[in-house]
Amino acid sequence: MGGNAFAAFLSASAFPRLPPPVYQSVKARLLPRISECYTWVGVPREAPEKNDHGDLDFIVSDPKHPHTSFVPHDVVKQLIGAEHVIPMEGNRTSNYAVPIQPGDWSQVGLLSLEREKRQISEEGRIYYQVDVHVCTDKDEWDRIIFFHSYGDLGMILGLMARNNGLHLGVNGLKLPDQPNPPFNLSSSFDEICQFLGLSLPDFHKGFTTKHEVFEWATSMKYFDPRHFRTNGQGITKVKADRTMYAEFVDWVARNHPPTQDLPDVPQEALVSRIREEALKFFKKQEEYKSVVAERSRRARLKEAFSGHQVRDWAQLGNYWRGAKLIMDEVRRRLGGEEGIYNFLKENSEEDLKAIVLQVQTDLASISRLCKPSGSFTDLTPIVHPEPSRRI
């Protein structure tokens, strides 16, 4: 979240960095206003020891009466006194430019700094950038508030999860399963933190320094300095401006160097064990087995009963419609895809080929009986005569 969304018509100097006292003052002023139209309104906890802030992010959900599915952008614009808005419909982030009134920063003893910022602005006016992200429901609101709290902590936890064969993001914890879609384990960060051995009371109590954040993150029960890496398969490259993330990487190198005191466990074996523990903890073992079995079934069917395979067996050349007609009839006779899969479990592909050829013969015969000569669908094999030989 963040960034100057108004660069198309306002200069970067029109949006000064906000000192913490100003940031807290604006947050305290605008939060009750936005709460007039949303049931759930919050701001992710700021990174500790942050010198200034670029913008203010509000996470909202559940519009209040008289609004139902959404609150019009003009309503929010008027409530917070914005001059400009970049509206985004639905479950997205809209950006508002709220003018900084002359003398606004005097309440926190920073009037001279405000005047300095106003003088260097190309427009002669300065603004707060206020971003309002609308969530679909309270569950999503909880997830976003958690994952975006304490600066780059969410990204740090995501990196540590990747190191252990898991995927942790704003939508929860998943099992990567490339090239297939990831398998969902949980979208509840209460459950996820319990599984990872992370203390939620400490998280909610708050952190006063970045080092406290780093200590909390590395209390994850699966953290192992020997397997800690910041690049490679499955790890997304992080932007250079993520300074807290970079500081964490350096902090780990200094404070948690790999040790030889512990027994060496191959990375593959470790990842396999963690994945099994995750499936067991979240009670997803049977569901995952079903997903794997279904994937295996589909792969087997694709290999043994594809359009190309049926076309080749029936020698139909490029007559793909004929192949489809045969496949539809085979499915009907054997009881659909599931019936074909069960047939292949007890029979060979040659047995399936025999059924395909029998269906081809039956359909060709029916076509000849039902339609005038020369107008039926020809499902007979295409025979290519051998070239004549010179004697």
Image (cartoon, rainbow, N blue to C red):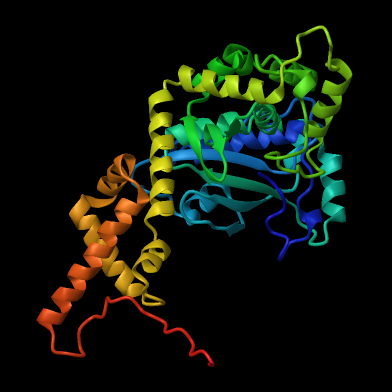
**In x, y percent, where is residue 184?**
47, 33
Q: Position of residue 244 (x, y in %)?
A: 79, 32
Residue furthest bottom in the image: 390
Q: Which residue sits at x=52%, y=50%? A: 92
> Residue 223's image quarter?
top right
Q: Can residue 313 be seen in this view?
A: yes
Where residue 275 sits, quadrant-wise, is top right
Which residue is drawn at the image coordinates 60% and 36% (left, top)? 29
Q: Is residue 310 left or right of residue 14?
A: left
**Is residue 333 toward the left or the right of residue 170 in the image?**
left
Q: State left or right for residue 143 relative to residue 369.
A: right
Residue 43 seen in this snapshot: no
Looking at the image, residue 183 lies above or below residue 305:
above
Residue that sits furthest to the top in the current view: 261
Residue at x 33% of width, y 40% of height: 345
Which quadrant: the N terminus? top right
